[in-house]
Image (cartoon, helix red, strand yellow):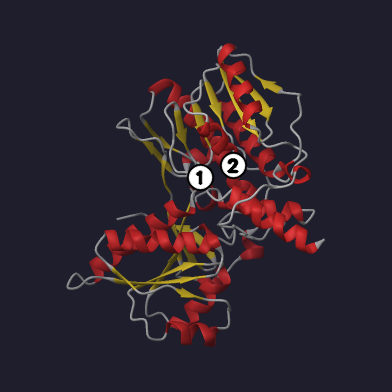
Amino acid sequence: MPVRRNVLIALAGAMLAAVPALSALAQAETSSGVSGSRGTTDSESRGAIGPESRGTASKERQTIGKGPIGIALLVPPDNGIYRRAAQALIAGVRAAHARDGGKVSLEIIEIDEDAAMLRTLYDELARRGFSMVIGPLTRSAVDLVTSAGPPPVFTLALNQPDQGTVPANMVTFGLSIESEARQAASIAWGEATIADASRRPRAAVVQDASPLGRRAAVAFAARWRELGGDVYQPVTVDTVATGRVRTAVARLQADVFFVAAPPAVARALLIALGGRATIYGTSMLNTGAVPGSEAAALVRSPDLDGVRLVDMPWQVQPDNLAVMAYPKPADMHLELQKLYALGIDAFRLALQLLEHGTEVDLDGVTGRLRLSALGGRAVERSGVLAEYRAGVLVPLALQ
């Protein structure tokens, strides 16, 4: 059975590639429990996950609120592989609804990944006068919606379609690792040019072999080149042994190192570099060590001091006004917290879209969220730059 389980894990990752947190949860669910560690088992190959793993959508629906504005939230089945992801998302949406949803009737609907069922559901929602759909959550379900053309009810999809084309009457929003990597590149490039404006800044990328790491690495390098910098060929690290990491990067005379790998790789690289360059990364490097959190004392990481990363305010900035406005469930680990935050901002975005159309500028718990009225169909998310100091993540003000 282990081979079959591993296949399911890999296929689950492919279906959820635009939301890295979901890949870890899919892996954990197939292992009969959700772990607190970040296991990112994305796969670049696609395939069908067995029905016993997807689960079967319940016909029962939950309605919250009695407002005149109808919003439907489409989630994976509660008896399938993504149940905890769905539960965290629902909890976040409900938290936002409790605060700002007085005029909204929210209907939570489990869906199967079936094109005919989705078409029938959308026709029903249109007939009943719903104003907005939030979801689906998985990439494969979003693909099914987009393949039918513009949906009859305006949709805020929580993943990117695989073909990359977003139809009319739809906007996408998610927690893309690529957006964090691109932002890290922009920040690091700015710092490097300030330090030495006499030449093109050089960056080195250290990645692991996972698809998530490769995607982050490619996004960082592409953005660095767009800005006019030079990038060494990426170094793939399959060990956290400091000596081997030191050997792998010894000849790289880079101003900046970008780590697209777990925190252990950043630790080894930090020792190997001996302080000769700044290390940047994404939320992949977040251990959960945030000042004031109950977990800070347990996961404090002084051996990461000086490492910088881009993550959402919800994870690194507890005194952010938007973050402080919502309860933070103590029983959710790092990956579930991301989906909870996604749910909060998805509902807030839905309200903004209903009020302002396709032009949005929102200070969200997942970052600064912007959508241009000039043809934009994807919400742009800018996270927070944070640095490990005394073992915990401290937000930094951008210059």
Q: Is residue 137 left or right of residue 273?
A: right
- Residue 81 seen in the current view: yes
Residue drawn at x 42%, y 28% is 168
Residue drawn at x 59%, y 18% is 123
Q: Are marks 2 and 1 in contact (CB under 8 Å)?
A: yes
Q: Quadrant of residue 133?
A: top right
Residue 162 has which mark? 1
Of residues 56 and 40, which is closer to you in this image? 56
Of residues 353 and 103, which is closer to you in this image? 353
**Mark 2 is on which residue type?**
Ser
Q: Quadrant of the N terminus?
A: bottom right
Residue 140 has which mark? 2
- The picture places residue 119, in percent across and down from the top left corner, at 60, 24
Residue drawn at x 58%, y 83% is 241
Query: In this rendering, is residue 193 above or below 375?
Result: below
Query: In this rendering, is residue 158 above or below 358?
Result: below
Number of residues whose C-alpha sits closer than 10 Å to that of mark 1, classed few (under 14), some (14–19) or many (20 or more): some
Number of residues whose C-alpha sits closer than 10 Å to that of mark 2, classed few (under 14), some (14–19) or many (20 or more): many
- Residue 102 seen in the current view: no
**Mark 1 is on which residue type?**
Asp
Of residues 98 and 262, which is closer to you in this image? 262
- The picture places residue 155, in percent across and down from the top left corner, at 50, 28
Q: Quadrant of the C terminus?
A: bottom left
Furthest residue toward left: 198
Counting labels gives 2
Question: Which is nearer the N-term, disc 2 or disc 1?
Answer: 2
